[in-house]
Amino acid sequence: MIAMLAAAVIAFGITVLVTPVAVRFFHARSIGQHIREEVEGHSHKKGTPTMGGLVILLAVVAGWFAGHLDVRDASGAWQLSFKPFDRRGLLVVLAFVGMGVIGFLDDYSKVRRARNLGLRKTWKFLGQGLIAGVFAWGALSWELTTRVGFTRPFGADLGWFYVLWVLLMITAVSNAVNFTDGLDGLVSGSSALVFGAFTIICFWQFRHPGFYGVGGALDLAMLAAALTAATLGFLWWNTAPARIFMGDTGSQALGGAMAALALLTNTDLLFIILGGLFVIEAASVVIQIITFHAFGRRVFKMAPLHHHFELMGWPEPTVIVRFWILAGLGVALALGIFYGDFITSGGVG
């Protein structure tokens, strides 16, 4: 518990204190957001500093290291050292930082070209595939779970097909979070709710190892706590009117971390409910593309879904808060299902 608190405090402190420094740094170098012309009412956001996800990356990694600090040895004497780093935690950091690097390259390309077009889709997908491949290789090499799960694993072991499942999860979730990142504070607030739920799930699995069989759950809980605190700290400056955007650097990294936590806690399919807002946003994009190419018509005024409601006349803060509520409902329902399985399956008694 102390390790989780240390990770959270450090992560929150860094995002709250370093983000305004990043704002001044990016302002001085004219590193600002380029707005899509078709998005009405967002022209005033042009030039707002972007790539704030770099601060989130720094905060989470620093919090994770802080959580592993040990100031006493086995005899109780003062001695600064690090507790062992669990392999599962390393895989989450790989997905988080790796996807963040891809997002950074995308953001940098947009800034350099001075337009809202970053990496080509082919290069972005190849980068995401590389991260997913290394993640899957690590899971297979270290003999971690390679079964699909809801609240716990079920079904046959996927074996090497696990690579395809990891690729699907990481690319789908990271892109879903990226689609959602279009309004001030929408992703940072929603992500804090999801990572808060993962903190509870991981800590619960740590307290009941015999029931869940998830090794390294405390390390995962530490990372989830750092991610929760970092996104909340960033929200302090990212809430409307945002002083900085996280950019693809942040949204891709957060999506990668969510997918990794879902995979390693055996809640792959539960994430459909837990991250329901992101699933809905991604689904709106898919539906819009399919209906337009198949029938020449659009279901929504604009996709992703949050822009549809903006064009219907909802003020931006209204859309943000109502979508936060949807995210919270998904989180509450998922936690209820997770705990309900524990009760009904003999976890108590």
Image: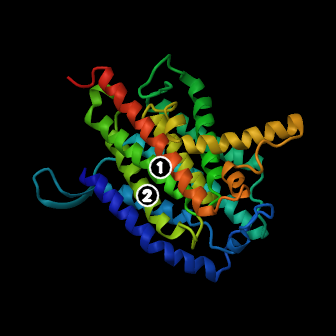
> Counting other residues with Cα less than 10 Å from the Cα at mark 1, is it few (<14), some (14-19), or many (20 or more)?
many
Q: Position of residue 115 (x, y in %)?
A: 78, 66
Q: CA distance from mark 1 to mark 2?
A: 8 Å
- Rendered image: mark on residue 93: 1
Three-letter amino acid code of the residue under disc 1 = Val
Q: Is residue 138 visible?
A: no
Q: Position of residue 61 (x, y in %)?
A: 43, 58
- Rendered image: mark on residue 61: 2
Q: Which residue is at the far top?
A: 156
Front-most of residues 81 and 103: 103
Local SS, label 1: helix
Residue placed at 11% from the left, 55% from the top? 76
Q: Which residue is at the far right?
A: 296
- Quarter of the image for residue 331 reads top left
Q: Which residue is at the far bottom?
A: 28
Please tell me whether residue 41 is drawn above or below residue 284 in the rendered image. Answer: below
Earlier residue among tags 1 and 2: 2
Quarter of the C terminus within the rendering: top left
Front-most of residues 81 and 279: 279
Three-letter amino acid code of the residue under disc 2 = Val
In contact (CB < 8 Å): disc 1 and disc 2: yes
